[in-house]
Structures are given as structure tokens and as C-alpha cells.
Amino acid sequence: MNIQLSNVGKRYNYEWIFRKVNLEFLSENNYVILGANGSGKSTLLQTIAGNLIPSEGTVSYKTENQQTIETEQIYKQLSFAAPYLELFEDFTLTESIEFHKKFKPFYEGLSTMDIVQLAELEKAKDKQLKYYSSGMKQRVRLALAVLSNTPLLLLDEPTSNLDKNAINWYQQLVNNYSFKRLIIVASNQLEYEYPFCKQQILVEDYK
């Protein structure tokens, strides 16, 4: 998938978060959007995801074969993980995975138990998510997103609430499931969140 941002800007009331963003994200490449807290990196990522409508400019999506993907259909092509993303907390982990399958396919050959094991949450698979720690919940978000078979993977501050061992787990998971997809990470200058990203974008350049 390729994504083109043409003269994109976003504002709330009279305050511009960013303006004149002209960027191209190319298939099978990894990018990181860098910025301090409140700089607009999450807003930019949400705009790329189609969750926010730009105040000016356009965001367009194309397949590798240059076929246009309509904005209202882009959700089918992407997976998204962020610490603020709500989970169905009355579900157990296995129930969450089964529910997720109804909307997004996982990589071929991955069973529910495979995903539980890859998340390293076997002992808590039958526990409701509301009893999970914040770090365990973030593992769930990341596992569901990274293991979904989509051409676009968006990660907003992915290591939030993760300890050192979990950060290593996250890096390995992305490395193992990054083939043939476009990955965009939003990060608060934390290098361990994006060691696999070769191209950097600074939100401050578009103020």
C-alpha cells in the first residue's frame, strides 16, 4: 500500500496542529513520526488512518498495483495499536481473539492458541481483560494489531506501559511480522520503539 498526503493540515478551533504536510509513504517501508507530547504526532497518525478528516488537503491510498482505495474502506486494510485504544474488558483473551477474527484476519496458519502464546499470556488466557495490568493490556493491543494480516500497520507509542522484557518482546514480534507491509510508528523520541524504522518524520517541521 502507498499513502500520499498532499498539503494536509489539521486544526482545532483556531489552532493549527500541523500544516502543509506533503508526504509519501511507500509499501514495505517503515517510518516513524517523532514529536514531544502534545506536538500532534498522534493526530497525524489518526489522520493517516482515516479516523480524522484533515482541515485542509487530501490523503489518498493506493494498492501496490496503483488501484485507488476509498477513504471509507481504508479500515479494512490497516491494523492500529495505541495505549488509549479501548478493549472489551469483559472478554477474556481467547474471546477477544475470536471476536477480532470476525473483522480482521490473522496471518495464515495462526490459531487462537498460537496468538495467545505469541502474546506470552498463556496463564491469563481465560481471565477477563479488566483484571489485566496496564502492561498486559498493551500486549493484547499489540498482538492483535501486529498479528493481523493487513498491509498497513500503525503503532502509536507502542511501548507505553511495557517493561524491559516486554519491549524486547514487542521488537521481536514486529520484526517477525513486518514482511510485505507498510509500518508507521508515532513515538516520543524513544528509540527502542522504532529500531526497525529507517525513515524519520518530525512533526515540528510542519508547524
Image: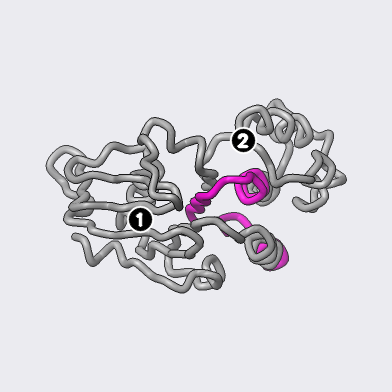
- Is residue 137 left or right of 22 when viewed as pictured? right
Furthest residue toward front:
65
Q: Quadrant of residue 97?
A: top right
Give the mark nearest the N terminus, 2 or 1: 1
Q: Is residue 157 visible?
A: yes
Which residues fall within the magenta stretch? Answer: 141-167
Residue 114, image x, y percentages:
82, 47
**Is label 2 or label 1 in front?**
2
**Which structural element holds mark 2?**
loop
Residue shown at 43% from the left, 32% from the top:
73
Q: Position of residue 122 (x, y in %)?
A: 85, 46
From the image, tell me which residue sits under label 1.
41
| Crowding at mark 2 (Cα within 10 Å: few <14, some 14-19, many 20+) | some
**Which residue appears at 68% of the width and 32% of the height?**
101
Q: Quadrant of the C terminus?
A: bottom left
x, y percentage for residue 44? 33, 51
Q: Is residue 160 magenta?
A: yes
- Which residue is at 80% across, 48% downward? 121
> The residue under label 2 is which amino acid type?
Lys
Instruction: List the residue tagged with mark 2.
Output: 104
Number of residues whose C-alpha sits closer than 10 Å to that of mark 1, classed few (under 14), some (14–19) or many (20 or more):
many
Left or right, residue 106 beside residue 186: right
The answer for how far apart the CA atoms under marks 2 and 1 are is 25 Å
- The amino acid pointed to by label 1 is Lys
Q: Secondary structure at mark 1?
A: helix
Question: Residue 27: x, y in percent?
Answer: 46, 58
